[in-house]
Image (cartoon, rainbow, N blue to C red):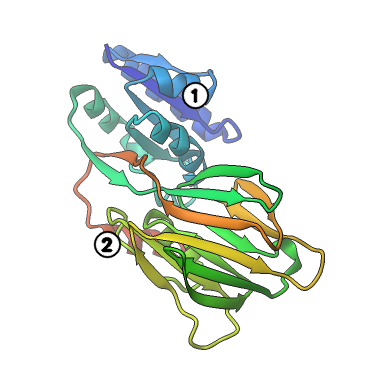
Amino acid sequence: MMKIALIVNKDKKMAISLASDIAQMLSESGAEILEDKPHDELFRACDAAITVGGDGTIIHSAKHAAKYFKPMIGVNVGRLGFAAEVEPDSIADLKRILNNDYDIQNRMLLDVTVKHKNGDTENYLAVNDATLARGQLSRIIDISVSLDNSPISTYRADGILFSTPTGSTAYSLSAGGPVIYPGMNCILLTPICPHSLISRSVVFDGGAVLTAKVKVNDDTPAILSIDGEKNIEITPGDLIIIKKSDKPLKLITLYKRNFYQHLNEKLKERKS
C-alpha cells in the first residue's frame, strides 16, 4: 500500500475542501493517507507527498521532501501556481501516482551558509532564492561577490538575488532576470535596482561556489531572506556562501508540457 503525505494550506477553505476530496479519492483507490503530523514525520514515513495550496505551500514542503529524497507534487489553489502541477479540476489525475504512471523532474536547490564574524554558522536550503538587501529601508547596499574564492564584482544596488532555475520565474524575474529552464543546473545572480547600467544578471555553472560580503555605512544590518520565509541579519564581516545543494527536489510530473508555453500562460494570468 502506497503511503501518501497530504500537506494542506489550512488558511484556505478551498484547499481544505479539495484536500478532503483528494484523501477520499486516493483512499478508495488503495492508498494510505498521512496527514496532520509534523512535516518531518510525514516526509520520513511517506512514499510520495501531495501539497494543496499555492507556491508558498510547495516551497515550504519542498525542503522537507528534499531532506528525505521523497517525490512531491503540488495541487494549485493559489492564484498563479508556477510550481504546481495539477489544477483543482484535474485532481483525478493524482490516481496515476498510485500506479507509478508519472515522471520525476529533479530541481536544483541552493545550500546557503552564513558564517558570522562571531564564529556562529547557520545553514539553510533555498528552493527559489536567497535575497540580500536592506530590508524595508530601501537603502543602497554595497555587496562584494567572489567565485571560488576569487573576487569577481562589487554591486551597489538595493540588493542582489541568488536564484535557482526554479526561482528564475519568481522574484528574479520581477527584478529583470532571465527565465531559465527549471531542469538546468546553474546559479543565477540578479542585482536589484543596480546603480550601474552595466550591472546585469549573471548565470554561473552549477558547480560554482559563490561568496558574498556586505558593506554598510551605518549600524543598520542587511537582511538575508531565504525564499521569503526566513530572515537573517547580516553585518559587515559576515560571510555568505551559496552553492548547489546535494539534495535535489524531486517533483512529480504527470503531463508532457512545453515549459515556455506553460510559463506564458501563467504570466498572462498574472496580468488579469
Residue 131: x and y in percent read 57, 59
Give above or below for 39 relative to 254: above
Label tally:
2
Find residue 91 and report its image quarter. top left
Secondary element type, mark 1:
helix
Label pair 1/2, CB-CB below 8 angstroms: no
Give the amino acid type for the residue marked by disc 2 in the picture. Answer: Gln
Q: Position of residue 96 (x, y in %)?
A: 22, 28
Report how far apart the C-alphas of labels 1 and 2 lie in the structure: 35 Å
Instruction: From the viewer's side, name the closer residue of 40 and 153.
Output: 153
Which dot, 1 or 2, sits closer to the camera? 1
Specify the amino acid type for callout 1.
Answer: Asp
User: Mark 1 sits on what residue?
Assistant: 40
Q: Place residue 28 in its image quadrant.
A: top left
Of residues 74 and 133, the one drawn nearer to the viewer in this rendering? 133
**How many residues crowd mark 2 within 10 Å: few (<14), some (14–19), many (20+)?**
few
Instruction: Please report whichever mark, 1 or 2, sits nearer to the chain's N-terminal start.
Output: 1
Residue located at (57% from left, 79% from top): 194
Q: Position of residue 179 (x, y in %)?
A: 36, 66
Residue at 37% in and 60% down = 208
The residue under the point 47% across, 74% down is: 176
Could you say which is closer to the camera, residue 29 or residue 174?
A: 174
The residue beneath circle 2 is 261
Does residue 262 lie above or below 252 as drawn? below
Q: Position of residue 255 (x, y in %)?
A: 22, 44
Secondary structure of the residue carrying numbered label 2: helix
Label placed on residue 251: none
Q: Is residue 77 above or below residue 33?
A: below
Determine if residue 179 is in view.
no
